[in-house]
Amino acid sequence: MAGNMEVLRWVRPHLLNLKPYSSARDEFSGEAMVFLDANENPFNAPYNRYPDPLARQLKSKLASLKGINPEKIFLGNGSDEPIDLIIRLFCEPGQHNVVTCDPTYGMYQVAAGIHNIEVRKALLTADYQLNSREVLRWTDQNTRVIFLCSPNNPTGNLLDPAAVLEVVSGFQGIVVLDEAYIDFAPDHSWLKRLDEFPRLIILQTLSKAWGMAGIRLGMAFGQPEVIALLNKIKYPYNLNMLTQQKALELLQNEEKKEDWVRLLLRERAKMADELKSIPVVKKIFPSDANFLLVKVENAAAVYGHLLSRGIVVRDRSRVILCGESLRITVGTPEENTVLIESLKKYPIMNIQ
Ligand SMILES: *Cc1c(COP(=O)(O)O)cnc(C)c1O
């Protein structure tokens, strides 16, 4: 356990000693028949009752799906919540810094910025791989967290596991590995190896493969000491009753998720294949996720052309190392056909 406790030395000291808000439902967890403890309205069941602050039923379902102890799971309002809470837990505003591996997901920088935490950007290589030496070079005695994202957004590729290992074992602080797109990737998640790395926190979400972006449910996996601290500093009722119920219900159908993933992977391959024969497309980057990063001639013009036909993609051309590139999500077969047919009409449509 000494190995696990070591992570506590990185926690902001005042949070170690913080006494959290204790809700009525925290203090009582037996089987009562009359609840007169929380100033709820007795009418309008079941919406009148506060939800379980620790979402225990949902956590136990996820624990069995993921093959992990519920004490190692934190549940939040999307992954965005644990990203924010991890920064709050470990980083002293105006003093500490975090390292991101750019180009990557924008929320790490925003969350750090909100807390006045310096963000140091270590560039990925030209083929979007993790350069572990470059990442470690950016760290100093004030670096508390390194954010890795695999498969990475917006590039789509998995990070080389050997390089991830070098970062995780070469850095003394916290490493966050964001696996939002892991269900689409051929490699297995790092979740199986969680216990080998007491300072590793893995993020996953129901927003992508599970098709539940609208209900906002993100997961963080880590050692129980870290998870307990995240639970201590979160809003008491961060997951509302509707989210907890709907997630429990939809998680029963894992086969459906797997069908979707298979279909989307087929569609991704087909889309990549069809894009190859479109003259304006210069490069299709290899993807392990449910989107493709595509380099085109004049991204702004292609983006505008698609938009004029009612198709929205993401213009990433102002993102570092992503010049003239669009990020295109894989949709239904029909949607993907509309995209390809529209691209085939470019730029002819615009000349007329
Ligand atoms: C979409 C995405 C998420 C998911 O965020 P939620 O808040 O769970 O919806 C997390 N990380 C990355 C890299 C993403 O692209």
Image (cartoon, helix red, strand yellow):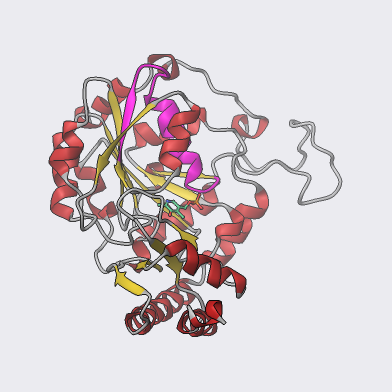
**Residue 267's spot in the image, x, y percent?**
41, 81
**Residue 221's spot in the image, x, y percent?**
36, 45
- The quarter of the rendered structure image containing the N terminus is top left
Q: Nearer the viewer, residue 89 or 276?
A: 276
Give the residues drawn in magenta, as a range.
77-100
95 inside magenta stretch: yes
Q: Image quadrant of residue 255?
A: bottom left
Q: Is residue 192 left or right of residue 212?
A: left
Q: Is residue 229 visible?
A: no
Q: Image quadrant of residue 15?
A: top left
**Residue 326's spot in the image, x, y percent?**
42, 63
Name which residue lies at 47% across and 47% down: 79
Name which residue lies at 22% across and 29% down: 139
Q: Is residue 34 visible?
A: yes
Quick check: 152 above or below 284? above
**Residue 342's spot in the image, x, y percent?**
52, 81
Q: Nearer the viewer, residue 22 or 193?
A: 193
Q: Is residue 108 left or right of residue 338?
A: left
- Outermost residue, right direction? 43
Q: Nearer the viewer, residue 272 or 158?
A: 272
